[in-house]
Amino acid sequence: AQSVTQLGSHVSVSEGALVLLRCNYSSSVPPYLFWYVQYPNQGLQLLLKYTSAATLVKGINGFEAEFKKSETSFHLTKPSAHMSDAAEYFCAVRAKANTGNQFYFGTGTSLTVIP
Amino acid sequence: DSGVTQTPKHLITATGQRVTLRCSPRSGDLSVYWYQQSLDQGLQFLIQYYNGEERAKGNILERFSAQQFPDLHSELNLSSLELGDSALYFCASSLDSYTDTQYFGPGTRLTVL
């Protein structure tokens, strides 16, 4: 079975500070991992994904994530937080079914950016 | 704007009733996914369709059913509604059955009173 765990349901950072959102995965096979962002009253938007190529993945809006197999982690970072980064962030893992895909999401981390 | 549309935006109904949620995928996408997002259970995968056929099933209750039509739009039918079914229901689409990049719609907020 595949799953992801997000540590910290709420994270607050000052504007300009480093953003670090944590995600650990559990998978019996090489995982496909994703980070999504959800702004209030909107659907999810893909930030970045890891599909077994480079371990450091760059996404949109200055975010990046590093896949660390030894730590079973896929933490999301951004060097300098902006007010517009305030949102809910979800880590997800894909499990391939016989004929399709299943995606399992973490419980989400709400990011607050303090001016 | 992801290109995925969902209707209605909001739906309020009573326990025991039946509702239908509609989703139109992005132009060119053949696969549709349905998700339920609730406060207590988070974001849960329900079911995936590809070109009219069911391809993967998640934690979908027997009271819930879905289908994808020849024009590729999809409907999620929820019946014998309970208070606990109150949630945001998202549809997402992807190019095909195995492409892992999904585009999410804005969701339908269902309130069961």
Image (cartoon, grey):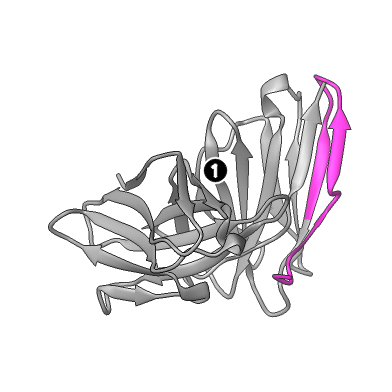
In the rendered image, which quarter is residue A98 located in? Answer: bottom left
Q: Which residues are magenta?
A: B1-22
Q: Where in the figure is residue A51, as x and y percent of width and height? A: 33, 72
Quadrant of the rendered image containing residue B112: top right
| Total labels drawn | 1
Give percent across and percent down for residue B62: 62, 31
Q: Is residue B17 magenta?
A: yes
Image location (x, y in percent) of residue B41: 53, 32
Which one is nearer the viewer's eye here, B55 or A92? A92
Q: Residue under circle 1? A: B43
The chain letter under disc 1 is B
Q: Is residue A39 left or right of residue A11?
A: right
Residue A96 in sight from this viewpoint: no
Residue beneath the point at 60% across and 47% down: B35
Magenta segment includes B88: no
* The furthest residue to the left: A70
Crowd around label 1: few <14 · some 14–19 · many ≥20 (10 Å): many
Residue B84, how many percent across, how many down?
A: 67, 23
Give the residue drawn at x 67%, y 55%.
B91
Three-letter amino acid code at the position of disc 1: Leu
Q: Is residue B75 left or right of residue B8?
A: left
The quadrant in which the N terminus of chain B is found is bottom right
**Which of the pair B2/B69 is nearer the observer?**
B2
Residue B35's place in the image compared with A76, above or below, is: above
Q: Quadrant of the C terminus of chain B?
A: top right
**What SS does tag 1 mark?**
strand
| Residue A9 seen in this snapshot | yes
Residue depicted at x 67% and y 63% = B52
The residue that appears at 30% across and 59% down in the rendered structure is A74
Q: Nearer the viewer, residue B108 or A79?
A: A79
